[in-house]
Amino acid sequence: MNSRPVLWALSMLMLVTVPARAQLNDLYDMGFVNTWRQGFNFQCPHGEVLVAIRSYYSDQEGSDRLWAFECQPTPATLGHPTECWWDDINRAGMEWYSTCTNNGLVAGVQSKYFEAVLDREWQFYCCRYSRRCPYSCWKTQDIPEYHKEEGELVIPSYGYFIRGAQTTFSGILRDRQWKYILCRMTDFDCEFENF
């Protein structure tokens, strides 16, 4: 028996599996806060808010996503947070529209995975800065653009903040798309309790 074809086949198999293993390790080096099908609670340090959100989808891992978040200190003109709280929660498998109450900004996220619906419930951690009010608000396009793709939001300009999100769930594809609500904040106190 000629061993040359067997050795060639084994070497090709090694070439195929090593890069795949390296890619998986690279995935875990991206700073994700959760593992597949596990809950998480992420909060920015006091005085910081979310400025970037990244997610990676897998069918094989329960139609779930790994999530990574980045924070940044708020501008000095906002001052320090005067209060923080966990806002409304959504239920797995349901659509959700949420903006932080009391003119708050998103400073954290928590989520729990539910095997029965292959989806997560979500809740924002919100912080209020004195009596500052949002203005020039807009919603992003769908993130990810198509279900089951990687998703990424990076605040497009300094001075914009995440105030909330609208999310839809596809029961067929078992994935969510997000439209984040981005706003500027006034440099002065205003009279509105929730805007």
Image (cartoon, rainbow, N blue to C red):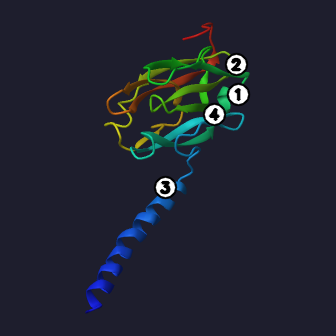
Three-letter code for the amino acid on which mark 3 is drawn: Leu
Q: From what the image shows, is residue 62 above or below residue 7? A: above
Three-letter code for the amino acid on which mark 1 is drawn: Gly
Q: Say whether marks 4 and 1 touch (CB < 8 Å).
A: no
Say which label, 1 or 2, has the lower sequence index: 1
Is disc 4 surrounded by few (<14), some (14 to 19) or many (20+) residues within 10 Å?
few
Find the distance from the CA under tag 1 to the CA under tag 2: 8 Å
Q: Nearer the viewer, residue 119 or 32?
A: 119
Task: Point out the image quarter for the C terminus.
Answer: top right
Residue 99 spot, x, y in % from top left: 53, 19
Residue 176 spot, x, y in % from top left: 40, 31
Q: Which mark is residue 75?
A: 4
Q: From what the image shows, is residue 149 above or below residue 195? A: below
Q: In the image, what residue occupies the spot 52% across and 44% down? A: 36
Q: Say whether marks 1 and 2 touch (CB < 8 Å).
A: yes
Q: Nearer the viewer, residue 4 or 193?
A: 4
Q: Quadrant of residue 74?
A: top right
Farthest residue toward the bottom?
2
Q: Quadrant of residue 86?
A: top right
Q: Quadrant of residue 47?
A: top right
Three-letter code for the amino acid on which mark 2 is drawn: Ser
Find the distance from the CA under tag 2 to the CA under tag 4: 13 Å
Residue, disc 3 = 27
Badge 2 element: loop
Badge 3 element: helix
Side of 147 relative to 138 (left or right): left
Q: In the image, what residue occupies the spot 46% across and 66% down? A: 22
Residue, disc 1 = 79
Is disc 1 surrounded by few (<14), some (14 to 19) or many (20+) residues within 10 Å?
few
Residue, disc 2 = 130
